[in-house]
Amino acid sequence: MESAGSAGHMKEEFISSAKRVSDVIWEVPKTFKEGMQVPARMYATEKLMKDMDDTVFNQLINVACLPGIVKHALCMPDAHSGYGFPIGGVAAFDPENGGIISPGGIGFDINCGMRLLTTNLTLKEVKPKINPLVDELFKLVPAGVGSKGFVKLSVSQLQEVMERGVDFSIEQGYGWKEDAKNIEEYGCIKGADSSKVSEKAVQRGLAQLGTLGSGNHYLEVQFATMGNIYDKSTAKAFGITEPDQIVVMVHCGSRGFGHQIGTDYLKIFGSAMKKYGITVKDPELACAPFKSNEGQDYFKAMACAANLAFCNRQVIAHQIREAFSKVMGRTAEEMEMNLVYDVAHNIAKLEKHDVDGENRELIVHRKGATRCFGPSRKELPAHFRKTGQPVIIGGSMETGSYLLAGLDASEETWGSTMHGSGRTMSRTKAKHMVRGEDLQKELDKKGIHVKTVSFSGLAEEAGFAYKDINEVVETMEIAGISKKVVALKPLGNVKG
Amino acid sequence: MRSFKYPFCTILIMPYKFLEGITTADVAFEATGTLEEVFENAAIAVAEVQVEIKTVKTAEKSHIDLERDDLSELLHDFLEELVFIKDTEQLLFVKAKVKITKKKTYKLEADLIGDHIKQDEQTMGTDVKAVTMHKFELKEVKKGKWRAQVVLDI
């Protein structure tokens, strides 16, 4: 299935053939392997490159072979092997030039993403109450296998969720009006059409709105020490002003709804490819021309899932505000629980970018990669036009997370940066190395209070299963794509 | 390597095992046996990822009928159906009896036994969100003996 080179050698071949565009950019030309339409670029330090999963290189080369790809196939430093595209893969396709759309370039969990809320509380106030706070969050935000959402929706309301995104949730009382302006695409990707979504996806979607999920999805109470603020004025613009200020981070997506859409369209594209004469090197790379009926149908269905995911995180944010109110005895408004930003990291978007001096509309795929627009992008609301877009990078439960800002030079990656620290170890192996119960105790000693539905699931998410987030974040800073604003440390964590 | 004996399986080899080195972020397993046992064992492996089997009561029954042109597709869609039932009816199955007949197409009839998901009573694992086609395989390795390899999206 991995066509380009046999497993185990691709990385060596890639490294020995790569030109060092800079300290952190490794590029192989399109002559590297047969079928490549464009060169392939990897963003990584020497250390991250050395530890990179071999499959990533095969998958990146396969992406470079896809029809209509523009300029480069790109890979972020947190990359690991995925289905079709690597996780951490970024590619733009030109719809006017046979460019494709591929579910394998987006991921099954459409609009899996991050959300960050501030508070005006400090570590000193929250630490003594972290146990009841985590308990309350655990109670109000259903998580784990088989959890059901508390939002009861009719089929027609679900259609509104799909087509109108967060505006609908806010109208229903979940959240504040001003939340919408702090969400990528204002919480609604245009062009969503619920008639392109299968009955099965609808059935899965009905039960799950407002649930966190499981796997690497989590909700975390964090704090920002003054020493961890790298850029004071940007931090202030993003709402982080006090020493040891408490913030809340959420990582989740479109749940079974998005997965069903991915599964449905992978099948449709599998047969559509024959019609369009497209061959790919991995069934998970199934794709269709963006302008074809199948491509358009998928884009409209994908937008539905993206909008549902924005709503999901919106509804969860509402529950977080409720939980804090109950435990801290103040209203969410009094605690200034404002939304810093909500950003997708599994998505395809129609965006205008510069291609050799020409402004072109491209279909940009980000799979395990985050949009990081710089200050000059007019898509950003006025209050981010000086700072650049907030970028939320989730680390492991142990190592902490980052809030970054996008830079204008990110145009070279189609305005994209990494999404997390990136796994290096399989779930099965991680479970052999530590018991979830022991890990919970260990974390507790470090002052991180974790509550989980699944202890085996907790073990799978142990810090040692991930890359060094500092090194990953640093890579994109050296590349001039995104810059550090604040490093956030965990205090309490809810896991599915 | 973890392995679990499925109590209703008559063969002595491991009916399924989880694999390392296939996927970093998700879960891979192989299931072996006769063609029908491979389907049954794969169904139990999908449940095992999500819950400790022995903590699930055999309280609920269900049935799946499927028809496909191709055996691989039949296995893939059968497992997908289990994920769908888990998300819509909150049911996990810990026993499976599968019958496959071939006429023009392959026809599957599966009887399933398990229980509703009860997080307080069962030992939960990690949610399975999709059955991928990544390195998906169903092969007759020698006469009457089959092997499937499946990667689940977590």
Image (cartoon, coloured by chain):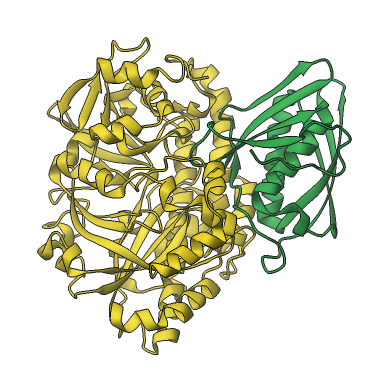
Chain colours: A yellow, B green
In this view, the residue farthest toward the bottom is A329
Residue A67 visible in image: no
In this image, A35 relative to A475: left or right? Answer: right
When asked about the image quadrant of residue A86, the answer is top left
> How many numbered dots are placed on residues in this image?
0
Q: Position of residue B67 (x, y in %)?
A: 79, 31
Which of A255 and A61 lies nearest the eye of the viewer?
A61
The residue under the point 44% across, 46% down is A465
Instruction: Give me the residue at 37% from left, 49% from top.
Output: A190
Q: Based on the displayed image, in which of its 4 quarters is residue A246 positioned?
A: bottom left
Q: Position of residue B33 (x, y in %)?
A: 80, 28
A325 up-or-down from A144: above or below: below
- x 68%, y 60%: residue: B123
When the figure is inspected, residue A109 is found, relative to residue A187, above or below; the finding is above
Asked whether A125 or A32 is in front, the reply is A125
Residue nearest the observer in this picture, A275 or B79: B79
Examine the rendering and report whether any part of residue A459 can be seen: yes
Could you tell me residue B50's position as x and y percent?
65, 52
Where the C terminus of chain A falls, by quadrant?
bottom right
The percent position of residue A265, horizontal first and vertical second, equals 55, 35
Check the image and report above or below for A428 versus A177: above
